[in-house]
Image (cartoon, rainbow, N blue to C red):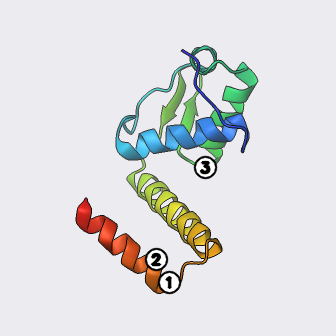
């Protein structure tokens, strides 16, 4: 099953973001083993080098760790996972506010709209 990608950003970054969201949502548990590079590449329909780049970036971000001869695992460091969640939240909010301001909305209109939407949730 090939994943769908958009043309607005590199594929490795899209896979990285998807994995981070899955970790934040609890779909991938702390300590869980990630698929091998080859398995992930076949599943996503991408070159194994792309997946290797994703795994390297996960390791650089301290979201995953490679255990020699065993594969890659999601970190069990709760502090790091909380920071990942906070970083993603701040990134999403920042993007939303930027888009709204570029569309001409005032901070008051943005807050009123958010408040109204949250009441409907």
How far is mark 2 from mark 1, CA to CA?
5 Å
Q: Closer to the observer: label 3 or label 2?
A: 2
x, y (%) of residue 86? 45, 62
Q: Quadrant of the C terminus?
A: bottom left
SS category of the residue bearing label 2: helix
Q: Residue at x 39, y 73 (%)?
A: 113
Q: Residues within 10 Å of mark 2 (few under 14, many from 20)?
A: some
Q: In which quarter of the image is the N terminus?
A: top right
Name the residue rendered at 36%, 35% in the picture.
27
Can residue 33 be seen in this snapshot? Answer: yes
Q: Residue furthest front?
A: 104
State the residue position of label 3. 61
Instruction: Measure the C-alpha gap from mark 1 to mark 3.
Output: 33 Å
**Which residue is found at the position 41% from the left and 30% from the top?**
32
In the rendered structure, are the residues bearing label 1 and label 3 in contact, judged by CB atoms less than 8 Å apart? no
Circle 3 packing at 10 Å, graded few (<14), some (14-19), many (20+), is few
> Quick one: label 3 or label 2, which is nearer the N terminus?
3
Give the image quarter of residue 116. bottom left
Where residue 38 sits: x, y (%)? 63, 15
User: Is residue 76 shown to the viewer in this render?
Assistant: no
Compared with 100, 71 (above or below) is above
- Label located before the other in sequence (1 or 3): 3
Name the residue carrying label 2.
110
Q: How many marks?
A: 3
Determine whether label 2 and label 1 are within 8 Å by CB. Answer: yes
What residue is disc 1 on? Answer: 107
């Amino acid at each position: 099953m090939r994943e769908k990608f958009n043309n607005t950003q590199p594929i490795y970054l899209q896979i990285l973001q998807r994995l981070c969201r899955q970790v934040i949502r609890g779909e991938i548990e702390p300590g869980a083993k990630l698929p091998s590079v080859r398995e992930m590449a076949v599943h996503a329909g991408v070159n194994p080098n792309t997946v290797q780049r994703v795994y390297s970036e996960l390791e650089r971000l301290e979201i995953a760790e490679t255990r020699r001869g065993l594969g890659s695992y999601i970190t069990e460091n709760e502090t790091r996972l909380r920071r990942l969640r906070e970083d993603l939240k701040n990134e999403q909010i920042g993007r939303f506010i930027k888009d709204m301001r570029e569309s001409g909305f005032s901070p008051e209109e943005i807050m009123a709209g958010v408040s109204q939407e949250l009441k409907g949730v």
